[in-house]
Amino acid sequence: MATTLHIHPTAELAPRVLLPGDPGRALLLAQSLLQKPRMFNHNRGLWGYTGAAADGAPLTIQSTGMGGPSAAIVIEELVRLGAERIVRVGSCGALVDGFALGDVLVAEAAFATDGTSRALGAGELVAGDAGLTAALVAAAANGAAEGDGASGAAAEAPGADDRAPVRQGAVLTTDLFYDPAGEHADPPPRDALAIEMETATLFQLGALRDVATGCVLVVSDLLGPQRGRIEQEAMEAAAIAAGKIAMTALS
Ligand SMILES: O=P(O)(O)O[C@H]1O[C@H](CO)[C@@H](O)[C@H]1O
Ligand SMILES: O=c1cc[nH]c(=O)[nH]1
């Protein structure tokens, strides 16, 4: 079996991959979405799994760890091993009003304010694959219509009826979760809906390596006018909903 310096496959890699940051979320998604999951990687604590998705074809779920440098290593090695379509299933902090904890957001582009994507040559804004993004939006809309998109927490939140069921737009990718300069080193670009740490790197590497990339995010934090942090149980339910959206988009 082919191997790489950091990802040491212990099962086949599927050509389509879900990419959470959190290794625990990789395990949760593997247990929730895959038939007969097998460990794909455990080197460096970056848990990954391969099994059969709902459509019967193989799907790999591989964690990146946190931040662009770790994500860039994992994505590069997955591509070298044969990954063709990759969807990040991440968490984010909403920067604007209108989100509730557990909402799902499709990131169609990322403002590259992190060092990794910039080192890879990203300009100010880097986009994901248009077809994969459209498939994510469609899958999220269907999931929301069936009550399976945003989490129950979002559905019960005050003002939930006023929100579009699926939000799509640009996110801000940054290097710092804890920023000593304040909430953010720079005022966030006005049209960034949320902040997170890996999407610009994923999209830039996708463009460089000719691999289709997309991103669906769960709102785990409210950083705009309203403040809050999601509970673990609600995070897990929303992550499974986001994972289903990503799996459907890759079908
Ligand atoms: O939940 P994940 O996918 O790790 O994503 C977000 O969560 C981490 C920070 O808590 C960063 O990796 C950020 O991008
Ligand atoms: O990077 C991140 C991820 C989740 N929530 C945040 O506030 N920032």
Image (spheres, grey):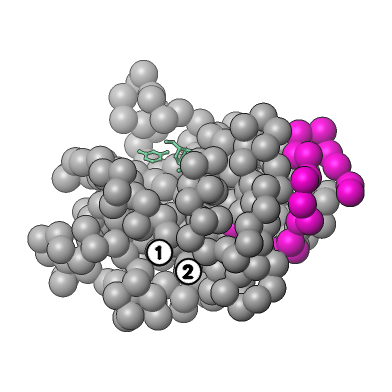
- CA gap, disc 2 to disc 1? 6 Å
**Residue at the limit of the structure toward the top, as seen here:** 180
The front one of 105 and 96 is 105
Give the total number of marks visible in the rendering: 2
The magenta region covers 1-18
Percent x, y for residue 27? Answer: 53, 48
Q: Which residue is at 82% across, 33% downward?
A: 5
Relative height, residue 182 to residue 154 (above, below): above
Residue 83 locus on image (x, y percent): 76, 58
> Quick one: quadrant of the C terminus?
bottom right
Circle 2 Cα neighbour tier, 10 Å, few/some/many (<14 / 14–19 / ≥20): many
Horizontal side of 23 relative to 51 (left or right) equals: left
Q: Which residue is mark 1?
A: 241
Asked whether, in this view, residue 53 is left or right of residue 242, the answer is right
**Residue 119 in sight:** no
Q: Residue at x 26, y 44 (%)?
A: 231
> Is there any visible trace of residue 66 in the rendered image?
yes
What secondary structure predominates along the stretch shown in magenta?
loop
Query: Pointer 2 and pointer 1: residues touching (CB < 8 Å)?
Result: yes
Observer-nearest of 64 and 185 = 64
Vertical arrangement, residue 231 with respect to residue 217, above or below: above
Q: Position of residue 98 (x, y in %)?
A: 22, 59
Report the residue marked by disc 2. Answer: 245
Which of the labelled discs sits on residue 233, or is there none? none
Q: Residue at x 77, y 46 (%)?
A: 10
Q: Amino acid at mark 2?
A: Ile
- For numbered disc 2, what is the local secondary structure? helix
